[in-house]
Image: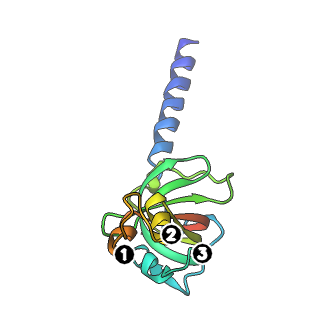
Amino acid sequence: MKLILLLISILIANVAIAQKHVPLPHGMVFGEKPDTAALMQASKLETFMGKKTRITTVITGKVIKVTQEKGGWFELGAGYNRIISAHFTNAGINLPKQLAGRTVIITGVAAKQFIANDLQHMAGDTVNGKKQHKANANSDRKISFEVKGLMVDK
């Protein structure tokens, strides 16, 4: 009886360890499969958006970290020390932590998030009552991305 329990516990331990080391294959898709016809780098997204606040697009970039597995929340590197915070519109999608460090292709809606300094700049006034320089006003702007589909690239 003890031998059977020992064998079962060893089997369970091996299965648990083996599941953690499963690599994500190239081309693995979460959600919808992205159309790569109009693919662009994540670092070029902000300049491509211009003055638009929302745009539907397909971008590629490196996942910095998966912040929340349930619901598919992750951060994507946008170059120049910028980060795009992304999440799936379908909350039923779960992303594995092994996605961190991988290059992915995502499709969805990019949106600029404005902070108080940007809104005051748009009004033409700041807290101090002085005009703000355009370069300084855009430095704190962040982009969020509502993901409809993700494909592991590299």
Which sits earlier in the primary sequence, circle 3 or circle 1?
Answer: 3
Q: Residues within 10 Å of mark 3 (few under 14, many from 20)?
A: many
Q: Secondary structure at mark 1?
A: helix
User: Could you tell me which secondary element the residue under label 2 belongs to?
Assistant: helix
> Residue 22, how many percent across, how many down?
47, 51
Q: Residue at x 51, y 19 (%)?
A: 6
The amino acid type, in three-letter code, at marker 3 is Pro
Q: At 31% across and 63% down in the image, what residue appears?
A: 81
Query: Is 141 or 62 nearer to us in this picture?
Result: 141
Q: Position of residue 114 (x, y in %)?
A: 50, 63
Q: Which residue is mark 3?
A: 34
Is residue 48 at all visible to an observer of this figure? yes
Taking the image as shown, residue 106 lies to the left or right of residue 77, namely right
* Amino acid carrying mark 2 in the image: Ala
Mark 1 lies on residue: 134
Q: Does 56 appear above or below 20?
A: below
The quarter of the picture where the C terminus appears is: bottom left
Name of the residue lying farthest toward the top: 2
| Circle 1 or circle 2, nearest the eye | 2
Label 3 – label 1 distance at C-alpha: 35 Å
Q: Which residue is mark 2?
A: 123
* Mark 1 vs mark 2, CA separation in Å: 13 Å
Question: In this orientation, which residue lies closer to the viewer: 119 or 91?
Answer: 119
Q: Quadrant of the N terminus?
A: top right
Q: Secondary structure at mark 3?
A: loop
Which comes sooner in the sequence, label 1 or label 2? 2
Camera sees residue 29: no
Q: Position of residue 24 (x, y in %)?
A: 48, 59
- The residue at the point 46 percent across, 73 percent down is 60
